[in-house]
Amino acid sequence: TISVRKNFVKIILKELAELWSEFDKDSLSEFVGFMKTHRKEIIIGIGAGRMGYSVQSFIMRLSHLGFKSFMIGDTSLPRINRNSLVIINSSSGETLSIKILAEKAKEVGAKILTISTNENSSIANLSDKVILIPVFESSQLMKSIYEQFSMLLFDHVIHLMVQELDVDEKWIVNNHSILE
């Protein structure tokens, strides 16, 4: 039989709170500032697996705020160029498929913002800005803590951007799809 730990959700929430306490809060204003600086540009999200799902949610929220944002693989993805911003979510910063895309983006002069635990990774070294998530010893499977944390981080950044850009929430709701 499978053993289920009682109150594992409490453990997950405790770990997320601990990780948040270690996170450099000053990087939030840097993140929002970077997004504001590049808000008129085409924004492309890149991530693999569950880290990819987290950045995909962020890209969708950016479109709700009126940004021209796309996820890698979208059939309507415009050409990446020097006026593009690429947002990469990679805990290791070494995922080969993402590294190849980052190299191509850098080659054409796109700006790269990376969220990672590794400031010395190959992808971080290609980036114009790196938002660091602290390395954390988690009791969860694999890298679940980073996927969860990045999702919460992205939602928090969206909330800060709504405030900073003074966007009317009713306007945001009207940008949400009704065909789901």
Image (spheres, grey):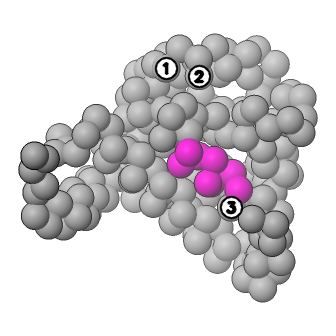
User: Residue at label 2?
Assistant: 98
Between the residue at mark 1 and the residue at mark 2, the CA separation in whole angstroms equals 5 Å
What numbered label is drawn on residue 61?
Answer: 3
Return the x and y of residue 172 as percentages of the image width and height: 77, 75
Q: Is residue 178 part of the magenta span, yes or no?
A: no
Question: Which segment did they paint magenta?
Answer: 53-60
Between the residue at mark 2 and the residue at mark 3, the CA separation in whole angstroms equals 22 Å
24 horizontally vs 153: left or right: left
Return the x and y of residue 176 as percentages of the image width and height: 78, 70
User: Residue at label 1?
Assistant: 95
The residue carrying pointer 3 sits among few (fewer than 14), some (14 to 19) or many (20 or more) residues within 10 Å by Cα, namely many
Q: Are marks 1 and 2 in contact (CB under 8 Å)?
A: yes
Tell me the kind of residue under disc 1.
Thr
What numbered label is drawn on residue 55?
Answer: none
Closer to the camera, 142 or 112? 142
Which residue is rendered at x = 13% and y = 47% of the image?
2
Q: Main secondary structure of the magenta part?
A: helix
Which residue is rendered at x = 39% and y = 53% of the image?
149
Q: How many marks?
A: 3
The residue carrying pointer 1 sits among few (fewer than 14), some (14 to 19) or many (20 or more) residues within 10 Å by Cα, namely some
112 horizontally vs 152: left or right: right
Q: Secondary structure at mark 3?
A: helix
177 horizontally vs 9: left or right: right
Quarter holding residue 166:
bottom right
